[in-house]
Amino acid sequence: MPNPLDKIKTQVKKLSAYTLNAPECRVKINQNENPYDMPEEIKTQVLARLANRPWSRYPTFVPVDLLVTMARFSSWRADGILAGNGSNELIQALLTVTVGPGTKVLISEPTFTLYRLLIEILGGEVISLPLTSDLQYDTDLIKHTVIEKAIDLVIICSPNNPTGGVIKDKDLIELLTDFSGLVILDEAYHEFSEHTVVPLLKQFSNLIVLRTFSKAMAMAGLRVGYLLSHPDLAREIAKAKLPYNLNFFSLTAAIVTMEHFDLLAPIINKLIAERERLFTALSQIPGLQPIPSQANFILTKTSISPSELMAKLQAKDILARDVSRYPMLNNYVRFSVGTEKENNELIETLQEIFTNHPIVGQNLPLN
């Protein structure tokens, strides 16, 4: 009998799927979610709008109301916006229309692992650059490499997952000015940095911005993301997007959430304040070295092996993220910013673990 796997691309069979081992824990700080649920007023309005909507009918083929609301919310034009089933779908659509055998895509690692996975599935070539020794973007190296290697696309996650670092506008503008290819800027965590590069879309037609409702917008369970670009680019990327990709429940929730963002803004501000408080507390625990972050998580170097630390935390019903398999991050874990109560529990548990552990060092070098 022929082997059906012979019909699968060779490069795909060599890859590992994007997976997540996430046992149930009471304190869940492993996926960078908003730990606070959507405000009840928003939930109530969403359900009210859905009550009289016939569920047997497809959503509108082009979600005009959603795109117009996104345009108002983001200060960009509606014909340059695509909505997706999470920003991951839009990353996939974008790479589908741009990447094939021979396409060179530059990423700085460690970063979101889905970029590399999709590029390699599509047959593109990943040109990987390391972050600097303090885990920031090496923009001089990026600008040099795009010319030297004839790069087609550059993907930058800012704030970067899992490090929390950002690229400065000045460096991004220099890259966009001198580079003839596309620059994809993933802004999944931009609300926590209180900054966006969307104004640069008016100046640079080779910039594409990705956003999500899964983090600050407290909608991880509903899967909504959006892409902002020059309308000509959006039109081409849309060809790889499945029809009716966004169900009307998620679509309606996104509209109501943007209309009532004033109810979410205080929660986001609270998480930013908690991030700074948590960073200070982690800095004071011998054996831990947190990295400054502009996102809703803190990458932290640990003198205890990440696997051992994860086991000790899970024994206390706390689920964090072991990122030690990422490039440059052999001894690192990542803590999402939780509620005040969750953060207090994490701090107290870490203090207990590291106080009682026989191998704890201070002033750890970053790498």
Image (cartoon, rainbow, N blue to C red):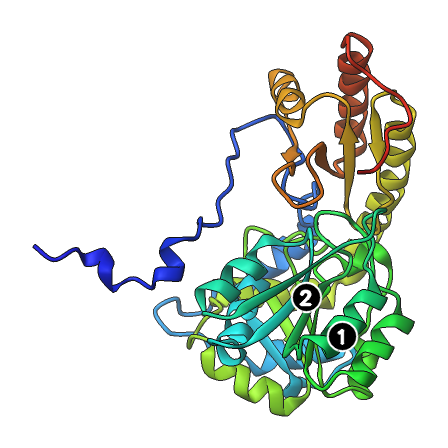
Type of amino acid at the residue the image marks with label 1: Ser
Image quadrant occupied by the C terminus: top right
Task: Residue 129: tell me if it is visible.
Answer: yes
111 relative to 99, above or below: above
**Residue at mark 2 to residue at mark 1: CA–CA distance:** 10 Å
Q: Residue at x 76, y 74 (%)?
A: 74
Q: Nearer the viewer, residue 9 or 306?
A: 9
Q: Nearer the viewer, residue 109 or 297?
A: 109
Q: Quadrant of residue 356?
A: top right
Q: Residues within 10 Å of mark 1 (few under 14, many from 20)?
A: some
Type of amino acid at the residue the image marks with label 2: Arg
- Contact? badges 2 and 1 (CB < 8 Å): yes
Q: Judge depth for marks 2 and 1 and give the one in front.
A: 2
Q: Is residue 68 left or right of residue 17?
A: right
14 relative to 206, above or below: above
Q: Nearer the viewer, residue 342 or 323?
A: 323
In this view, which residue lies farthest toward the front?
148
Q: Is residue 263 left or right of residue 321?
A: right
Q: Residue at x 24, y 64 (%)?
A: 7
Q: Nearer the viewer, residue 79 or 323?
A: 323
Tag of residue 211? 2
Which element carries disc 1, helix, strand or loop?
helix
Q: Which residue is mark 1?
A: 74
Which element carries disc 2, helix, strand or loop?
strand
Q: Residue 15: horizontal and vertical position, in percent?
A: 43, 52
Q: Residue 102: horizontal and vertical position, in percent?
A: 51, 77
